[in-house]
Image (cartoon, rainbow, N blue to C red):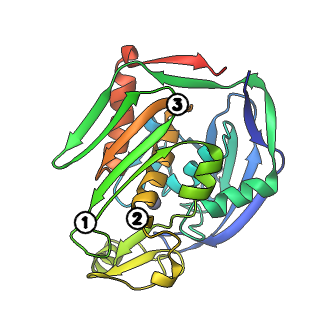
Amino acid sequence: MPMRHTIAREVAAEGITLHSGTQVRMMLAPANPGAGIVFRRTDLDSAEVPARYDTVSQTNLGTMIAAGRADVGVVEHLMAAVAGAQIDDLLVILDGPEPPILDGDALCYLELIDKAGVRKQAAPRRAIKLLKRVEVAHKDASAALAPAGAPAFDFEIAFPSAAIGRQSFSFPFTPEAFRREIAPARTFGFLHELDRLKTLDRGHGASLENTLAIDGDKIVNASLMRFADEFVRHKILDAIGDMALAGAPLIARFEGVRSGHALNNALLRALFADPANYRLIFLS
Ligand SMILES: [Zn+2]
């Protein structure tokens, strides 16, 4: 029977955060079986925030979780890496408001987890098996979870910019395929939105080293690209991170059409609103 996993030892990384643009230190530490993924803010009296769909407090410009007066922003890339490495229990210790953005992908966090090593826990791994299709939509965007024999992610995007255009990607999830096909896909943003972001006091840490920058129909730092369809792959990375907030692996097919963090969270809330939608199972 597959068992729960944590990491074998503490590892640390430092870097700038995407939105506040401040330097932070992040430490990943092993956690007890059943603890789940928990963030701790050492700069806020060590307040803890469980990484779960029902602690999501904001979804514009990244997924933010909050508990009491503590919040943690832009958790989705780290959560994607945690899901990709099949880590169930982990303590993420931060001295600032977000994990460091590092390379703007999930590979940087996977490599950190590799450095720590993975440890089997003395408790079996549980998963959430979809029994009924659940779908949420807003305008021309939608997100759905459908019953399936194994986890999979399908995504379609369409942007007016010719730099992106229409892209679709179908991804049967395995840890190996995640590392190769999805984890290296970097975050992206439009230069014309950067000024607006900065007036909102966000995006201070975005740079041409961690974000694919689009100016009209051109990619400013195209030399950074790792895939021709990197944008839709990054949307799958975000969806994997957002779905990891379910608290256990989802045995389901995720279908996203222009979906973002808000719809992804609404989808999990819709899933858990009706116990007839799913069943908790032990993996065999
Ligand atoms: Zn992202």
Please give the name of the residue rendered at 73% of the width and 59% of the height, measured from the top-left corner: 112
In what quadrant of the picture does the C terminus appear?
A: top right
Q: Could you tell which of marks 3 and 2 lies nearer the N-terminus?
A: 3
Label 3, label 2: how far apart the Cα atoms are: 24 Å
Percent position (x, y) of residue 3? 74, 27
Label 2, label 1: how far apart the Cα atoms are: 10 Å
> Is 263 above or below relative to 21?
above
Look at label 1 and name its amino acid. Phe
Q: Residue furthest left?
A: 139
Percent position (x, y) of residue 147? 41, 25
Q: Could you tell which of marks 1 and 3 lies nearer the N-terminus?
A: 3
Q: Mark 1, residues whose alpha carbon is within 10 Å: few (<14), some, or many (≥20)? A: few
Q: Are marks 2 and 1 in contact (CB under 8 Å)?
A: yes
Please give the residue where the numbered disc 2 appears in the rendered image: 231
Look at label 3 and name its amino acid. Ala
Residue 109 seen in render: yes
Which quarter holds ligand 1? bottom left
Please give the residue where the numbered disc 3 appears in the rendered image: 150
Please give the residue where the numbered disc 1 appears in the rendered image: 159
Q: Is residue 259 left or right of residue 188?
A: left
Percent position (x, y) of residue 255? 35, 41
> Is 172 above or below relative to 223?
above
Which mark is in front, 1 or 3?
A: 3
Look at label 2 and name its amino acid. Phe
Q: Is residue 144 left or right of residue 77?
A: left
Which mark is in front, 3 or 2?
A: 3
> Is 145 above or below relative to 193?
above
